[in-house]
Image (cartoon, rainbow, N blue to C red):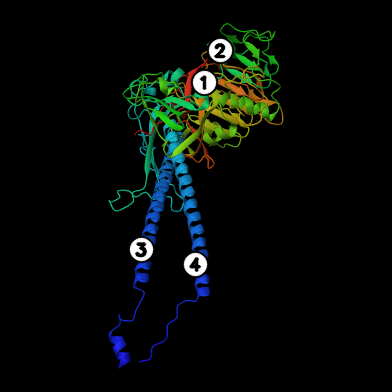
């Protein structure tokens, strides 16, 4: 009876209302404080994340820009026509492959401000995206960050300092025939040699010829630019660097490789010097690629390499032997034999319109005609027909797109 | 119904209870005040950190635009590159440090014309330290490399840090220039090394290169290193220092002497 009465009147003997209310108020206050501080923390995290993603997008855009320049050199630098050509890509949209979860992180495109087909000047527009970027995000989504930058690139010469004379050698120059003509109709020097110069008593031809270091032939001069004897690899590399403005490895990587096991008539002759991708294809029209030949090379059988309007740039990583009527239009660089002093051995009707640099000695006999031309006048200095390289135009980077 | 006889606390019980209560309350108060004071300090430091970082990001983002010129390529005709004519990288308009290292001035093209404007739109920019806060020039009649805000017209600059919250004690700019002579490879072992054309620039080369001839074209690649030091206002003991480096995207191209 009494027990049931107690149950029926629960409030009568209970206490702790004040404690309960106090505790609840305190709990609520603590909860509110926690929420508000969590909100501040959350906001800070969002700010930091935004900042991080904005930087990520900019860096991705910059990476895309560098990649676009690399690809421009790979795709457009050696060809007559530009991105509009069928062989090439008009607008390259690139997604990074092979990086899991990082596809679609940047895109780039080329435009030709000078008009279609003219690739002397290219405008690159590169866009980078943050890792949380969502294309066409709806309002409920986090869109992520994107950043677009622009940069002009311009075609320039791959031979930044074209030698001012037809023949340059790190070794000696030796000729044993009166039928050898070395002609420079543009400048004062015809031959620069590190070693002895023997012209068989015959003057080489040049404009206002210079008597170099007491040497008897007019227009021949000892090299003064490079000190020491060019018989160590560092000096040879320095001569290469001076000529091409970059290292052998760089130039090799930019060139079309040619392998011809000794005789290169077929591979280098005008029927075979067209670059398509990374392979040599047979094509009727001579073009002007940059070619890298590995190994000692012989040319003969009336082979013609290049043409006046499409000169070649040829690097022979080995010795060069020319005989039997060979005509070359362009620029030839010969590294020579690393073990002895053999560089170029020319005899029997060799004709070169352009210039030649050899790290090792030149040995000419028979009939040899070398006439210096500004083989790079159009091709190398911004024209479409020479071996060229795209560089950034200073002052043209902007993120105000 | 029997009722229990009720007792109060004894004196000893009451004393022990009160003493224990005091101890507990004192301990809790101590912990609470420590927490509040620590979190206040943390908050202040975080705020300083964030303000400094924000100012740094703002400066970096803008400085990398220095030297931009829309007309650097003429997009008609043959499209000659006129990098050496870029007024935004010449003379007083070029990126430079003034005010004893506390001020950086630069210009870039905003309205795509050929001259450097100082009014509307302003194309002369500066970051500088003034009255313990960082300011940014946004106009004014002064020349591009003027580092004295006091001499500028009113309203021509604004603060980018809050002087009521953060005291900036140091703002330092250093420009590192890598210069390349693209006209002529200077060989030899004497002369000034002001503009090198050195194939092995990054190696410990003993070769020094001669000064450029007049009219040689020089390319200058610039990095700006920025250091900011600051502390919460009225709390100089808690100082924050951050350093960052930005590569100026537009290289300066000029003809020697420059």
Image x and y of residue A99, in percent: 47, 51
A94, A137: nearer the viewer:
A137
Residue B64 seen anywhere in this rendered image of the structure: no
Mark 3 or 2, nearer chain start: 3
Q: Mark 3 touching mark 2, by CB under 8 A?
A: no
* Same-subunit check for callouts 3 and 1: no
Mark 3, residue position: A28
Mark 1, residue position: B218
A195, B52: nearer the viewer:
B52
Label 4: chain?
B
What SS does tag 1 mark?
strand
Image x and y of residue A324, in percent: 58, 24
Q: In front of the other: label 1 or label 4?
A: 4
Give left or right: position of B16 versus A141.
right
Label 1: chain?
B
Mark 4, residue position: B21
Q: What's the CA distance linking mark 3 and mark 2? A: 96 Å
| Tally of numbered discs | 4
């Amino acid at each position: 009876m009494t027990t049931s009465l107690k149950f029926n009147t629960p409030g009568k003997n209970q206490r702790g209302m004040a404690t309960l209310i106090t505790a609840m108020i305190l709990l609520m206050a603590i909860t509110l404080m926690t929420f508000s501080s969590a909100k501040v923390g959350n906001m800070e995290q969002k700010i930091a994340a935004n900042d991080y993603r904005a930087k990520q997008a900019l860096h991705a855009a910059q990476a895309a820009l560098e990649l676009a320049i690399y690809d421009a050199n790979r795709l457009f630098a050696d060809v007559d026509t530009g991105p509009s050509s069928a062989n090439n890509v008009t607008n390259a949209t690139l997604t990074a492959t092979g990086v899991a979860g990082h596809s679609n992180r940047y895109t780039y495109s080329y435009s030709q401000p000078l008009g279609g087909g003219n690739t002397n000047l290219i405008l690159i527009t590169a866009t980078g995206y943050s890792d949380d970027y969502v294309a066409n995000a709806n309002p409920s989504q986090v869109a992520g960050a994107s950043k677009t930058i622009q940069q002009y690139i311009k075609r320039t010469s791959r031979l930044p300092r074209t030698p001012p004379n037809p023949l340059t050698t790190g070794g000696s120059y030796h000729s044993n025939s009166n039928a050898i003509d070395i002609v420079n109709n543009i400048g004062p020097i015809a031959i620069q040699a590190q070693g002895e110069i023997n012209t068989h008593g015959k003057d080489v031809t040049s404009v206002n010829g210079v008597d170099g270091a007491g040497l008897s032939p007019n227009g021949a001069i000892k090299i003064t630019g490079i000190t020491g004897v060019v018989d160590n690899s560092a000096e040879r590399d320095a001569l290469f660097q001076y000529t091409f403005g970059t290292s052998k490895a760089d130039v090799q990587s930019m060139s079309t490789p040619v392998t011809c096991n000794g005789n290169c008539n077929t591979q280098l002759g005008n029927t075979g010097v067209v670059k398509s991708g990374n392979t040599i294809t047979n094509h009727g029209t001579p073009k002007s690629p940059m070619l890298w030949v590995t190994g000692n090379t012989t040319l003969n059988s009336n082979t013609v390499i290049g043409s006046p309007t499409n000169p070649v740039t040829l690097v022979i990583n080995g010795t060069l032997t020319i005989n039997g009527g060979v005509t070359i239009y362009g620029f030839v660089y010969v590294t020579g034999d690393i073990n002895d002093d053999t560089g170029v051995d020319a005899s029997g009707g060799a004709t070169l319109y352009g210039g030649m640099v050899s790290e090792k000695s030149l040995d000419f006999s028979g009939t040899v005609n070398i006439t210096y031309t500004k083989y790079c006048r159009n091709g190398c200095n911004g024209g479409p027909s020479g071996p060229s390289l795209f560089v950034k135009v200073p002052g043209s980077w902007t993120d105000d797109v | 119904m029997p009722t229990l006889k009720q007792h109060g606390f004894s004196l000893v019980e009451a004393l022990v209870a009160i003493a224990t209560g005091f101890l507990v309350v004192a301990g809790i108060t101590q912990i609470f005040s420590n927490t509040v004071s620590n979190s206040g300090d943390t908050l202040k430091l975080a705020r300083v950190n964030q303000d400094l970082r924000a100012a740094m990001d703002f400066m970096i983002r803008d400085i990398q635009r220095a030297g931009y010129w829309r007309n650097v390529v003429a997009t008609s005709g043959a499209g000659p590159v006129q990098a050496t004519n870029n007024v935004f990288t010449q003379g007083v308009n070029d990126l430079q440090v003034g005010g004893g290292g506390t001020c950086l001035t630069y210009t870039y093209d905003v309205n795509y014309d050929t001259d450097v404007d100082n009014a509307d739109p302003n194309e002369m920019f500066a970051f500088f330290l003034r009255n313990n806060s960082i300011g940014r020039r946004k106009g004014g009649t002064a020349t591009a490399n003027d580092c004295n805000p006091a001499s500028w017209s009113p309203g021509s600059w604004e603060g980018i840090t809050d002087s009521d919250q953060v005291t900036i004690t140091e703002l330092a700019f250093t420009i590192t220039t890598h210069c390349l002579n693209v006209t002529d490879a200077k060989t030899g072992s004497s002369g000034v090394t002001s503009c090198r054309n050195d194939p092995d620039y990054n190696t410990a080369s003993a070769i020094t290169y001669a000064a450029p001839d007049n009219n040689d074209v020089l390319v200058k690649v610039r990095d700006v290193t920025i250091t900011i030091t600051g502390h919460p206002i009225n709390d100089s003991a808690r100082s924050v220092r951050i350093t960052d480096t930005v590569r100026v995207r537009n290289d300066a191209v000029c003809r020697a002497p420059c």
